[in-house]
Amino acid sequence: QVQLQESGPGLVKPSETLSLTCAVSDFSISSGYHWGWIRQPPGKGLEYIGNIYYSGTTYYKPSLKSRVTISVEVSKNEFSLQVSSVTAADTAIYYCARLTYGGIDYWGRGALITVSS
Amino acid sequence: SSDLTQDPAVSVALGQTVRITCQGDSLRTFHASWYQQKPGQAPVLVIYDKKNRPSGIPDRFSGSGSGNTASLTITGAQAEDEADYYCGSRDISGNHLLFGGGTSLTV
């Protein structure tokens, strides 16, 4: 059973950079698959942010591309998300997940990130 | 707005059958996946690759699709099926994911 766990500060100030890390357990990232980030503003639907292959190739949602960076640390079996210049609109639950061709088969429990001064 | 369109809310009587639909151009190329999300929980994959059910998902959940439309059918809905359901797919490039806006199911 693959397990994913998000970690990061729950509160970020406007204009600063949001940083989250996803630790993967019981599966080696270097074995393959794409690893992604999805967010969900309070009371709203799911929004895809981007994904990364274990080799480091990244894919970002076009509308977020200028502010998002996803990286992978194979030696630590984790991957990370950075979103720069955050505003209140970036307040959301952030999920990390494992992507397969047919769908997202494993999700983290989610981390609530609030953007506020 | 989403590139995948779902009805915002659907209701079904206990034990009856309900179909939740998802429409989008990307579904002509890529198969849909379906996710169940209960309040305060992460989404759970209930259908992948249009019609396949992960282990542990009850067989009352089934998926189908044709053209630009995908469907999730719950045959004999149970009280515990009350949740939000999201469809997902790849975008035309195949490199990114798309989600529908979600359907709130009331049983």
Image (spheres, rainbow, N blue to C red):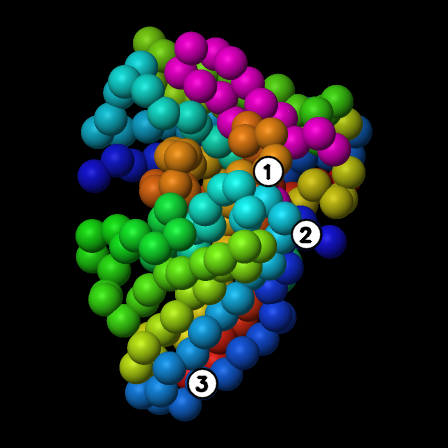
Q: Identify the residue under disc 3.
A: B12
Q: Which residues are magenta?
A: A47-63
Percent coordinates x, y for residue B52 in the rendering: 30, 52
The verdict on a common chain for dots 2 and 3 is yes
Q: Nearer the viewer, residue B37 or A58?
A: A58
Q: CA distance from mark 2 to mark 1?
A: 11 Å
Q: Nearer the viewer, residue A88 or B15?
A: B15
- What is the number of the mark on residue B2? 2
Percent coordinates x, y for residue B55 in the rendering: 20, 52
Percent coordinates x, y for residue A13 in the rendering: 73, 34
Q: Nearer the viewer, residue A53 or A94?
A: A53
Q: In this orientation, does residue B74 appear?
A: yes
B59 w.r.t. B48: above or below? below
The residue at 25%/60% (across/down) is: B57
Disc 3 on helix, strand or loop?
loop
Disc 2 on helix, strand or loop?
loop
The residue at 33%/9% (across/down) is: A75
Q: Earlier in the sequence, mark 1 or mark 3?
A: 3
The residue at 26%/51% (across/down) is: B54
Q: Identify the residue under disc 1.
A: B91
Q: CA distance from mark 1 to mark 3?
A: 31 Å
B56 w.r.t. A64: above or below? below
Q: Earlier in the sequence, mark 2 or mark 3?
A: 2
A62 drawn magenta: yes
Percent coordinates x, y for residue B80 in the rendering: 33, 75
The residue at 35%/87% (across/down) is: B16
Q: Are marks 1 and 3 in contact (CB under 8 Å)?
A: no
Chain to which the residue tagged by mark 1 belongs: B
Q: Amino acid at mark 2?
A: Ser
The verdict on a common chain for dots 1 and 3 is yes
